[in-house]
Image (cartoon, grey):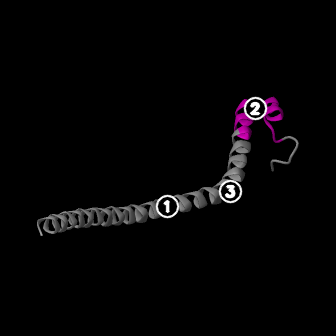
Amino acid sequence: MLALEHFNFEVMKGKSTAAAYLCSWIVNIVRFNSIFKKVKPLKDSADAAEALANEKLAELAVVLEKVRMINEKVDALKAKLFEAEEQKRRVENEA
């Protein structure tokens, strides 16, 4: 239908202004549909990639929290080691 010579705004305007605008609307809807068919799979793919990225970011947050907790434990153990070494030095100095 869009391939027909007379199916455009200018030709239809000679017959009827309403028909010309209707013809223009139909042409635009068909163009939109053809573009939408190309874009929709890309958008779906982008949405899926974004969802996966969000999932991985949530997993990363959990891992980072575990690393933070482990670092706190390591720091606490280092402090205890330092205290024990200080106590050892004091005992050795007293002896």
The first of marks 3 and 1 along the sequence is 3
Taking 85 as reference, is 46 left or right? right
Amino acid type, mark 3: Lys
Query: In this view, which residue lies farthest toward the front?
Result: 95
The residue indicated by pointer 3 is 37
- Image point 31% across, 67% down: which residue? 70
Looking at the image, is 48 positioned above or below residue 20?
Answer: below
Whole-percent x and y of residue 17? 73, 30
Q: Are marks 3 and 2 in contact (CB under 8 Å)?
A: no
Magenta span of residues: 7-24
How many angstroms separate mark 2 from mark 1 (CA)? Answer: 50 Å
How many angstroms separate mark 3 from mark 1 (CA)? Answer: 22 Å
Of helix, strand and loop, which one carries label 1?
helix
> Which of the two residues, 56 or 92, is positioned nearer the viewer here?
92
Taking 61 as reference, is 52 left or right? right
Whole-percent x and y of residue 51? 49, 61
Q: Main secondary structure of the magenta part?
A: helix
- Image point 60% across, 61% down: which residue? 45
- Residue 16's disc number: 2
Q: Is residue 9 in the magenta section?
A: yes
> Which of the two residues, 45 or 24, is positioned nearer the viewer here?
45
Query: In this view, which residue lies farthest toward the right?
Result: 5
The residue indicated by pointer 1 is 51
Of helix, strand and loop, which one carries label 3?
helix
Amino acid type, mark 1: Ala
- Residue 73's disc number: none
Query: Which label lies toward us, 3 or 2?
Result: 3
Q: Are marks 3 and 1 in contact (CB under 8 Å)?
A: no
How many angstroms separate mark 3 from mark 2 (CA)? Answer: 32 Å
- Image point 75% across, 34% down: which residue? 20
